[in-house]
Amino acid sequence: MQFLLICLLFSKSLADQYNINKTPFPDYFKFGAATAAYQIEGAWNEDGKGENIWDHFCHTRPKAVLNEDNGDIACDSYHLWERDIEMLKELGVNHYRFSISWARILPTGYTNVVSKEGINYYTKLIKELKRNNIEPMVTLYHWDLPQTLQDLGGWTNDIVVDAFVNFARICFESFGKYVRYWITVNEPFQVCHPGYGDGSLAPGLYSPGIGEYLCAHNLIKGHARVWRVYDDQFRDAQKGVISMAVHCGWYQAESNTTEDLEAAETKSQFVIGLYMHPIYLGDYPKVVKDRIAMRSEKEGFSKSRLPEFSEEEIEYIKDTHDFFGINYYSTYNVKAIAEPPIGEPSFEKDCGVFTYSPPEWESTQLSVMKNTPWGFRKMLKWIKDEYNSPEILVTENGIAIDEQYNDVTRIRYLKEHLSSVRDAMMFDDVNVTLYTVWSLLDNFEWSNGYTPKFGVYETNFSSPERTRTPRRSAKYYKHVATTHGIVWSQEN
Ligand code: BGC
């Protein structure tokens, strides 16, 4: 009893830390839920699907994933997609963000083989969503490059740009009639840094300070070409919008000293600006170009490790956006440090700052994702100021937490983050029009396997049916999506 009281008091005091904005979201505001192909579909080699880098990574380096989990079956959404749609209906959401598995549509990675089964799968899914008045929001690339392209260097080889454009064109031709929202690439930094820099995520290439910038360069070019193809050839008839979704952690200065403030800004430019500056403002951010060039020279390279865009490319890439897609999970502290010693190149040394999550901040199942709702508002304001007040769509936000019984922390997380978004809209005049919860259901959380629970629906991974059960947060989110109110009477 005493223990229960202490728990209650503790969770109450945490809940009190954040001042909830009680103003409901406006009528035009949209709510949805998100997933991604490799994380939910399973059926990794069914109906002619080709191998992708996540299949390959999990099968060839099983120890790189917690418990040696893999996405071979995942939530089995390839077979259970109708249940997923039922859940979206239960939630009363406007849109469903999911991704298309490139190798399911093009098993060889190229257009020489187009899988009828693959096209058929997404057509069924999209049509059924539309029939239920749920807008499909389709991500073209959520981290699952066909292995054939990886064998040639993946995103570090510019042949991938043409391949990506060809894949995108097939998707526009096949599904564009029904799709209003497209996302070219999910989280470019997470594709390039862990994928081609430190090697912690597929394809697991270790090339710090080199591979990751080559990846960034081609990925930005690929995004721009896909945007322009859509704009020139499809937009008039299909009337959709298309942009990138970027993982935006809020990098806050540890103190108000000029050095720490500058360090925090530098970090944001390296993680977010590296990708969004070319698309919004033209070319890489100055601080990123200057620092990499300066360090490359001292390290003995003949030119900067960051490739250069030509004047023509800068113009071509600029303005290839219709909205700003943001995935927000957490805030980090940043502190200025002395210039790191010259030696092996690395992204961290290029940034030249110290980034950390203070241990006293509330933890979640993932140590790099502390529960920090206040940073969301600051992040949104930063995007507004930095990129000329774009329309912002929250394409992901959620928490990994495993509370079987009452799910109070997830409910509080969602409530506080929604409140932070509402604050940004009301007090900072940020134009946010849509919010998407990550995730519809527990799924394969990349190198953390099935341990982190992000779903508002629980997935039972031990049952062959992958039974899905709503958590209490699903009920809370239904309340939000259907009433636009943040406060819920049944919260505790
Ligand atoms: C990714 C998701 C991932 C989520 C939680 C985002 O970085 O887009 O695929 O599951 O964060 O880590």
Image (cartoon, rainbow, N blue to C red):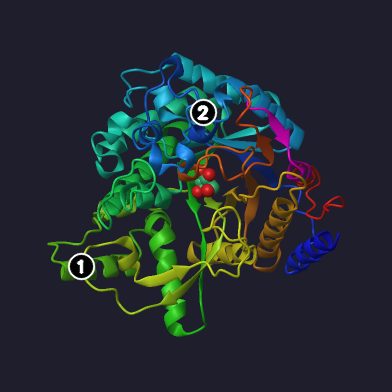
Q: Tell me the kind of residue under disc 1.
A: Gly
Residues packed near mark 1 inside 10 Å, few (<14), some (14 to 19) or many (20 plus): few
- Nearer to us in this view, 489 or 158: 489
- Nearer to us in this view, 354 or 130: 354
- At which x and y percent is residue 270? 38, 63
Check if mark 2's residue and mark 1's residue have beta carbons within 8 Å. Answer: no
Q: Tell me the kind of residue under disc 2.
A: Gly
Reading the image, the residue beneath label 2 is 176
Considering every residue shown, the one lying at the far bottom of the view is: 257
For numbered disc 2, what is the local secondary structure?
Answer: helix
Reading the image, the residue beneath label 1 is 343
For numbered disc 1, what is the local secondary structure?
Answer: loop
Asked if the magenta segment contains residue 452, the reply would be no
Please tell me in which quadrant of the rendered image residue 68 appears: top left
Inter-mark Cα distance, 2 to 1: 49 Å
- The range drawn in magenta is 466-475
Q: Which residue does the image show at 48% across and 52% down from the upper left?
A: 246
- At which x and y percent is residue 460? 65, 32
- Nearer to us in this view, 468 or 286: 468
Q: Which residue does the image show at 63% across and 26% down from the upper left?
A: 463
The answer to whether 171 appears left or right of 214 in the picture is right
- At which x and y percent is residue 356? 48, 68
Please report whichever mark, 2 or 1, sits nearer to the chain's N-terminal start. Answer: 2
Quadrant for the N terminus, please. Answer: bottom right
Please tell me in which quadrant of the rendered image residue 56 appears: top left
